Amino acid sequence: MKIAISGKGGVGKTLLTALLAKTFTESGYSVLAIDADPSANLGATLGFPHPQEIVPISEMDDLIEERTGARPGKSAPFFKLNPKVDDLPEKYWVEHNGIKLMVMGRIKKGGSGCYCPENALLQALVNHLLLARNEVVILDMEAGVEHLGRATARAVDKLIVVVEPGRRSIETAYTINKLAQDIGLHNIVVVGNKVRSQLEKEFLISSLSDFKFLGFIPYDQAVVDADLANVSVVDSSQQIINEVRKIYQDLLPVQASSKN
Ligand SMILES: Nc1ncnc2c1ncn2[C@@H]1O[C@H](COP(=O)(O)OP(=O)(O)OP(=O)(O)O)[C@@H](O)[C@H]1O
Ligand SMILES: [Mg+2]
């Protein structure tokens, strides 16, 4: 099963990615969590020791040069658009509590998209992870679908757009939906996060009436407190863990049907 998670900045993408990764792992699945957000913090959220020491793939200049034939930042007339990547997951994932994590890092964007070697390597790697791996792959993305192309869109079983009660996250959800439709990704669902009241839940449902909701996660001060105290955020709120378990259970039939 391949799950991609997107949404406006700060809505709770990383928290949901981490909790889903944990839930799948505890249920016996092999999970590869992919941090594809430039401001990478999935490792910290998952409680990896020394997360700041994990080197993102996009910063591995030697590897990028070895695989694409061009070094980041150096002008090169040609580089491989389809570099070898199938051996990279085992070499570069880090593992903690049974969850494997790969940190992609920042893709530097040029004026009209970046045709640079680091981008070619990341793109090939994401394609490989989504198309060829057997694990449950969960991608923590930014507010877009930049990492997905037409070929990989088909492999995504669910694109989860996280929203919070607020107009901007709703607008972002519509934008993401449009971008996703453009690349042929139609399996889109939303999760409402930081919901404090029935009124806020109804606001989300009425603002996103064209979307299917996979679940609602309450706002819990315990998450904020855990974050401030620098202790594990994923274990901080039992009510959030319970809601994510329901979301996990709703995701399961996807896998059964995609295996047929
Ligand atoms: N349900 C919740 N209740 C309380 N706080 C929450 C909840 N969900 C997320 N948060 C807090 O909100 C902040 C943003 O969450 P998170 O980092 O998961 O969002 P994000 O969408 O990944 O953000 P970014 O766009 O910066 O990557 C964090 O400090 C997190 O602890
Ligand atoms: Mg994040």
Image (tube, rainbow, N blue to C red):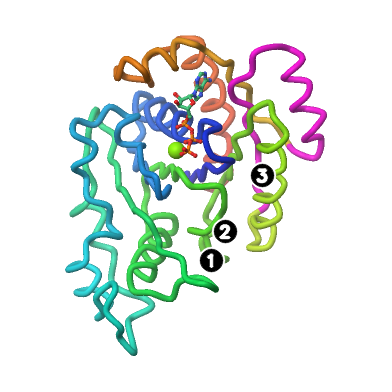
Image height of 63 relative to 260, above or below: below
Circle nearer the viewer, 3 or 2: 3
Rendered image quadrant of residue 126: bottom left
User: Is 204 contained in the magenta span?
Assistant: yes
Who's the residue at 74% across and 12% down the image? 198
Looking at this view, is 93 or 51 the one in front?
A: 51
Q: Which mark is residue 151?
A: 1
Question: In x, y percent, where is residue 97?
Answer: 24, 28
Q: SS for tag 3? A: helix
Q: Is residue 84 above or below residue 186?
A: below
Residue 111's x, y, as percent?
Answer: 52, 72
Q: Which residue is mark 2?
A: 154
Residue bounds of the magenta highlight: 186-211
Foreground disc of the pair 1, 3 = 3
Left or right: residue 121 compared with residue 239: left
| Disc 1/disc 2 C-alpha distance (Å) | 6 Å
Position of residue 185 in the picture relative to residue 238 (left or right): right
Q: Residue at x 47, y 71 (%)?
A: 110
Residue indicated by mark 3: 172
